Image: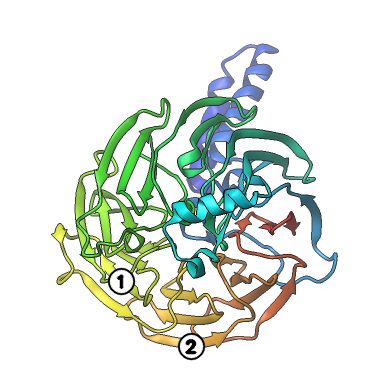
Amino acid sequence: MNTRDTDATLAETKLVLKQAHSPVRKIVMRFLLIMVSAALFPPLHAKADWPQFRGPGGHGIAHESKIPLQWSGADHVRWVADVPGTGWSSPVVQGDRVWLTTAIETKPTPEQIEAQFKESQLDREKFTRRQVAGSVSLRVLSLSRKSGEVVLDTELAFVENPEAIHVGNSYASPTPFIEGDRLYVHFGVYGTFCLDRDTHRVIWRRSIPVFYSVGVGSSPVLCNNHVVLVCDGIDKQFVIALDKDTGETAWKTPRPPFRAEDGQYRKAYSTPLFVSYGGRDQLVIPGAQWVVSYDPATGDEIWRVDHGAGFSNVPRPVYHDGVVFVCTGYGAPQLWAIRVDGTGDVTNSHVKWKEKSQIPKNPSPLLVEGLLFVINDNGVMTCMDSDTGKTQWRKRIPGNHSASPVFANGHVFLFSHEGTVTAIKASAEPSDLLESKIDDQLMASPAILSDSVLLRTRHKLYCIE
């Protein structure tokens, strides 16, 4: 609504109230003006919330944020909160609260380690890339956005002898999704929970058995009143939608047939992206061999693209103007630009362009005003024209990277394992790097608010503003 419409609405409200008698007129007028103003001018924090993995829309964009470009020592650090346990999920934010999942582990016995080795069906060398826990307490925390004080700390599940996971993963890697007064939390086979936002009371719980081999990674999304989960394990591969109010299955759709016979090359960990184009809603979900678009209401497949032999897909896609940009996963990572207006197998008709050089296995791409930014796991950053795929520039960024980049305050922010936060202008021309340092490991993607950034490290949660 523009200023002229706003003034007209307020004037009409005052004119109607002139007919009322005082003092009732004053009371009613004050009440109505408050209600009208609330409708016309929503509270600022409504635009500053970060409800899911990669924020509103799932693209990692915070257009109105004015977070600092650089800091050092205690400068710009509003608070630091200790986080028990470990988890690589992102914080989610609504109003004056922050929510975070974590996992508190106990050390395994030699017998537990040997049992996990036998169950993994891996050779000794590959098993060295697994971590084993004796037990794990899976928890959700809520903290004050202003102070970092822990308001609630709730155990949702306690698991003896949990499955071994990859050394780069955690038992609390999926990011929660918050909508209204409900919080949706996913721990893979150990439970998907719908909680009361304020009390952490469990409203419903589902357990969906899938063997992921290296632990769960996909974050839940809410779409069409469904909680959508990607269940691409080594034993089975499907996408399932649960009724957000009851947890009952709304639809379940198997993945397309695979060429690979080994389940290790069928697994994937991507988070779905909702897109709408030409009056058609879609959930685009990369996986091993295939990128598939589904109807979010029914789970029916809309289109599919065969991207080759990629697997263990982690990056979440990004989308703009009828084109979705997808990383093909481990093996030989590529970035594909795919038009979303097709039906059926559109591998040979709707792939706009491909890029094979310096593409990430874990960090998601970032799309800002026609420029596509990617950083690979070894710290090589590339800026591309999103229309053509042409490389604009390439630059080395300090450290190794798993967290997905974000856009805020005119810059792309990147987060290394070693704790370096790098800001660079979101421009077709390369610019100088602005570096800041956190004294802890960074693997979780951040939450970006209007004036602050929440950084989750191995042991702490930082509020920088």
| In the rendered image, the vertical position of residue 217 relative to residue 335, given as above or below | above
From mark 1 to mark 2, how far is it between C-alphas?
A: 19 Å
Secondary structure of residue under mark 1: strand
Could you tell me residue 4's position as x and y percent? 50, 46
Q: Which residue is drawn at 35% across and 54% down?
A: 234
The colour scheme of the drawn protein is: rainbow
| In the rendered image, the vertical position of residue 434 relative to residue 2, given as above or below | below
Q: Which residue is drawn at 64% across and 81% down?
A: 398
The image quarter in which residue 399 lies:
bottom right
Asked if residue 57 shows in the view, the reply is no
Q: Which residue is drawn at 63% across and 52% down?
A: 110
Could you tell me residue 432's position as x and y percent? 64, 86
> Mark 2, residues whose alpha carbon is within 10 Å: few (<14), some, or many (≥20)?
some
Using the image as rendered, state which of residue 275 and residue 451 is in the foreground.
275
Question: Which sits earlier in the primary sequence, circle 1 or circle 2?
Answer: 1
Question: What residue is pinned by disc 2?
Answer: 393
Could you tell me residue 441's position as x and y percent? 69, 65
Tell me, yes or no, whether the two marked residues, 1 and 2, touch with CB atoms within 8 Å: no
Question: What residue is pinned by disc 1?
Answer: 337
Secondary structure of residue under mark 2: strand
| In the rendered image, the vertical position of residue 108 relative to residue 181, given as above or below | below
